[in-house]
Structure formats: structure tokens, C-alpha cells
Image: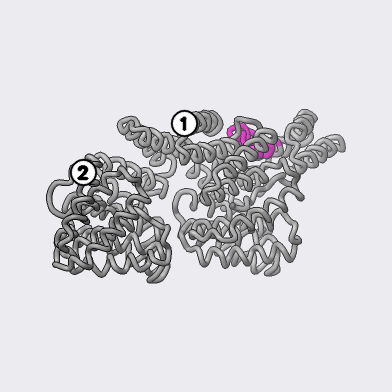
Amino acid sequence: MRSLVLTVLVCAAASAQTEQWEEFMARGNALRRENKHVEAEQWYRRALDEGSDTPRSLNSLGVVCYETARYAEAVAYYERALEIWRTSVGEGYPQLAATMNNQSAAFSAMGRYSEAEAIVRRAIAIREKAPGRDELQIADLLDNLAFNRSAQGALAEAEEIHRRVLGILEKVLEAGSPRVATTLNNLSVVLSKAGKYSESEQVERRALEIWEKTLGPESPSVATGLANLAEIHVKRGVFEGVEELYLRALSIRERALGPEHPLVAGLLSNLGGVYANQGRLAKAESMYRRAIAVDEKALGPSRPSTAAVVNNLGDLHRLQGRFPEARALYLRTLGIYEKALGPEHSSVGRVLNNLAAISRQEGRPEESAALYRKALANFEKALGPEHPDTGLVLTNLADLHYARSNFELAEAFCRRALDITRKSFGETHGATADASDRLAMALAALRRYTEAERYYARGLAIREALSGPSHVSLAPSLAALGNAYQLDSRPAAAEPLYRRALAIWEAFPENDLALQASTLNNLAMICSRTGRFAEAEPLFQRAAGLTEKALGSSDRSLAVVLRNLAETMRKNRRAAEAKKIEARAKSLKQDTEGGSHAYQAGSARNR
């Protein structure tokens, strides 16, 4: 979670203010701090009607609209305030920069990042030229500029800007200032998005240490740091301790802000995601529904933050195979986003992507492809053609076309997705390894095995560098590269890769059961084809057991393995036993004619 640097209320303008106006504004400010936005807005309107300081009243109304996700209204209020100041004091007046900063935040929330960026750059120029240069104000504006660059996929530039802000803050503030922690937190978020998880965690821990020391262990800022640490661990695939971090953050926020604050809802939703990953689906659903209830009570049923949790509940139901319920939730989310943020907001694209996934799972590939194309067009317009989210939809389109045996189209989408991933995350990121694997799959399906081997090897090298030579994530990559070698008639190159993958899985026996089974089958085939029938038979037996455990007793893959086992038994002069195995394979009513058979030989990682 990013810590927003927002100028909540700007300082007094040139016009005089009455005591009554000051009272109205003070009451509005107090109510807003208590999250009572409806009542706060009423007092700000009374201040506006009183007329002493119209621009500041408009700015405060803009803040209320922003905090209740009425972003278009907020932009309009900010623009009215800016027009008055431009007329009364001129374009270069520092007061404009504060409201422009707020307006930029509203445009960012609407997904209009290029407009937000242009505004914040103008605000920075005003602040830099103003008499008595205020370095802290410039730092705030730069932090928001970094956010907009990050949102547009320019992660390296965003990181550089945040580091520049840290340089400014080190000169004007003490090293342990909470404001320094805010930028450290924002830098950690960017580093995490870029896949620099170790550095991201180090930076976040620095921010957390400062907040705990200066604000106390019960500060809401501490909860933000804890939640961000948990998210970093999730992205790294390290789930141990994540639930505890989120629960501690939740406890802090509930005590500091109350159990019905929107920030509490955000943590409930995060916990729902953790429980879903753990397979605790009933508990996940309970968390999501609690989060929705809190958001609906605090902000109403039609706010984007509510929609985000509704979307998460839809994801859960899709995981459970409850497709009609998931679709209904996605359509509700889509309606909220289109109304609140506009049809071109990237959040709309994300829901279209989810609807496409359901259509695919329900066996409607044409409908799925059309929805993916709409999501792609949305991302290309809202985020740009080289944004990581654009790459995500390209990957999904590639998967869809691969499943339909449109391998040329799959290759084209995979190549574009890989190019985006490299530019966004670099050559050594896990996402680049995944994108390399997918391209390799398409190339293998096109029987371009030498090219496929090169991309599989690249993905394997990345994972080995990231996780070490014995990490469980390497096993599928080793098996995939082995499959490519076997398809390329290079069994001697495939065999050591299969053996290495199986050795890793021995430490993680419940992982990737179907892939373990196919690897055992394919290794056994190599042994059988090189006359090592005694070695091949127990491998086929293990493959049959794992196939039945993973896929069931009537899956076609089981018939393939049983036929291979029977043929090997005959080679080992055990015809009577082979005949029983053949009868079972035949009873599955699958076509297993021919010699030894491989299955999943072209697959890479679980998709």
C-alpha cells in the first residue's frame, strides 16, 4: 500500500476570513478526521456559502469528494479553486501547487495517469520557482510524480524519483522523521512491483522501524508497514508468517480507526486472499464478505473500494467453480467501475479480463477471446501498450489460443508479452522466466524444438539464480526442458534433467503431482527405449500411481501409462501380469495404439 502524499487543506488565500467561516471549516475538518464525510461536507458547503475564502472551501470539498471516491466531482472543485487563484493572484502563486497536487491525485485515482503527471509536473515547476523555496512541498509533489510514473509502468524512473526525494528529506529533516518513512514505504512499493523483493523488504523494515519509534507501535502507519511486508512475502511465495502480519495490522487499525473504517476493510480483504491461497476457502469467503459489509457501511455500495473486494469474492467463487455467482459479482464490479471511474479506466479492463477467464472455463472460447480483446484495448489505451497489465492479457490470449491449437497466434502473443515483461521487470525477473516458458511451449507445439529449448533454458537459469539449485520452482522448468529435448530426439540430454527434477520433488512429494507423474513416465520411456527395462518398470508403476492420485482412475493419461507399463512388463517376461494391466488400460476406453507413449511432453509450468 502506497502512503499518499496529499495536501488535505491548503493554507489561507489572499482574501480575509471571518470567524464564522473559520468555525465552519474547523467543524468540517474535525468531522472529516473522524471519517464522517457526509457531515463534514455539509460544514464545508456552509463555509463556501459564507464566502470569505471560496478557493479554500472548494479545495476542502474536493478533498471530501476524493476520500469518498467521487473523483470527477473532486476534480471539478479543484479546478474551480484554481481558476479563482489564477485570476486573483496569478499562475505562479505557490497556493496553486497545493491544489494542483490534490487534483493530480484525483486524476490518478481515475486512472488518467498522463493527465495527473502533467499537472504534478506543473505544480513542481511552480514550487521550484517560488520565493523561499519549500523543499518539503517539492518532496511531496515528487512522491506523487513517482506514483504516476510507476502506475504507467516506468518503475525504474519511479524508483529514481523516490530516491531523489529521500535525498531532499535527508537535508531538511532528521533521519528518523516519519516523513522519511513515508517515502521509504513508497519506494518499497515500487521495488516490490519491480520484483526487487529483498531490497523492498529491507526498505520497508526501515520505514516500519521509524514509524514504530516515532509514532508508537499502535500507529496506523505501522499497520501500513506490516501489511506491505506481508504483501512482499506473498509475492515471494513465502506464506509463513503472512497471516500473523496481517492480523497484527488489522488489530492496530481496528483499535486506532474503529472496526468499520475502510482501511480495516482492505486488510480483511487481504486476509481473504491469504486464506484462499491456503485452501481455507470458507474462511476466505467470510473475510471478503466482512470487508464488503464494512466498505458498504462506510462508503456505500457503489464505491470503487467496495467493488475491488466484490471482485476478489468473484475470484474466490471462480476458484471454487461457482461460475454463475462469480460472473454476477464481476458484472456488479464492472458496473461500479464504469459508473464511478468511467469505461476507459484500467479497473474496467481487469474485470473484463476476469469475465473472459470465466467464459473460457465454461467452454465458450469465442466469447472469452472477445472479452480478452476488449480488456487488451482498455489496457493499451489506459496504461499503454508496454504496461505489465497489457502483457498479462496478452499472456491470457496466448494461453487461450494455445488451448485451441492456434499455435502461431499463441507464439505471436507470447513474444509480445515476453518483450513487455523484459522491459518492465528486466531480464532476471521471475515474470520473465514465466513468459519465456510460455513462448517455449508455443514453439515446441510448432515443432521448433531448438528455439523452445533456448527459451526453456533461459527460464530455468533465471529461476536457479533467484531461488538456488534445489528450490521446488525449478522442478517444472527442468521437466519442461527435458520434454523439449526428448521431442527433439535428444534423450541423453533429457534424462539428467528428469532425474534432477524428480530429486527435487522428493523433498516436496505433494507438489505438481500430475507433472511428477508425466516426468516419471517420460524418464521410464528413455530407460525402456535404451533397453533398461528393469529400471523402467518401477518408474512406470510410480507414474501410474501418481497419475491416478492426481487425475483420477478414468483419466486418459492413466491409460497411456498403463499401456507403457504393460509393454515393459512383457519385455521383462511377465506376460501374465502385463495382460491384466492391458485389460485395465483397455477398460478405460482410450485409444492407446502404437508404441510407448509420452504425455504432457510439451508442457512447461502449471498454467
Front position in the image: 278 or 97: 278
Q: Which residues are magenta?
A: 61-80
> Residue 446 location in percent, x, y?
18, 49
* Distance (Cα) linking label 1 and label 2: 40 Å
Q: Main secondary structure of the magenta part?
A: helix
What residue is at 54 percent from the left and 63 percent from the top? 200
What residue is at 56 percent from the left and 52 percent from the top? 125
SS assignment at label 2: helix
Task: Name the outermost residue toward the front.
Answer: 576
Residue 68 is one of the magenta-drawn residues: yes
**What amino acid type should be assigned to the residue bearing mark 1?**
Arg
Front position in the image: 512 or 330: 512
- Number of other residues with Cα within 10 Å of mark 1, as a class: few under 14, some 14 to 19, many 20 or more: many
Q: Which is more N-terminal, label 2 or label 1?
A: 1
SS assignment at label 1: helix
Left or right for 174, reference 186: right
**What amino acid type should be assigned to the residue bearing mark 2?**
Lys
What residue is disc 1 on?
327
Residue 586 is labelled as: 2
Q: Would you say residue 342 is visible in this rendering?
A: no
Which image quarter: residue 181? bottom right
Disc 1 + disc 2, Cβ < 8 Å: no
Indicate whether 149 appears above or below 308.
below
> Residue 5 location in percent, x, y?
64, 51
What residue is at 24 percent from the left and 54 percent from the top? 601
Front position in the image: 263 or 287: 287
Left or right for 599, reference 318: left
Task: Name the outermost residue toward the right.
Answer: 19
Left or right for 171, reference 552: right
Residue 191 is one of the magenta-drawn residues: no
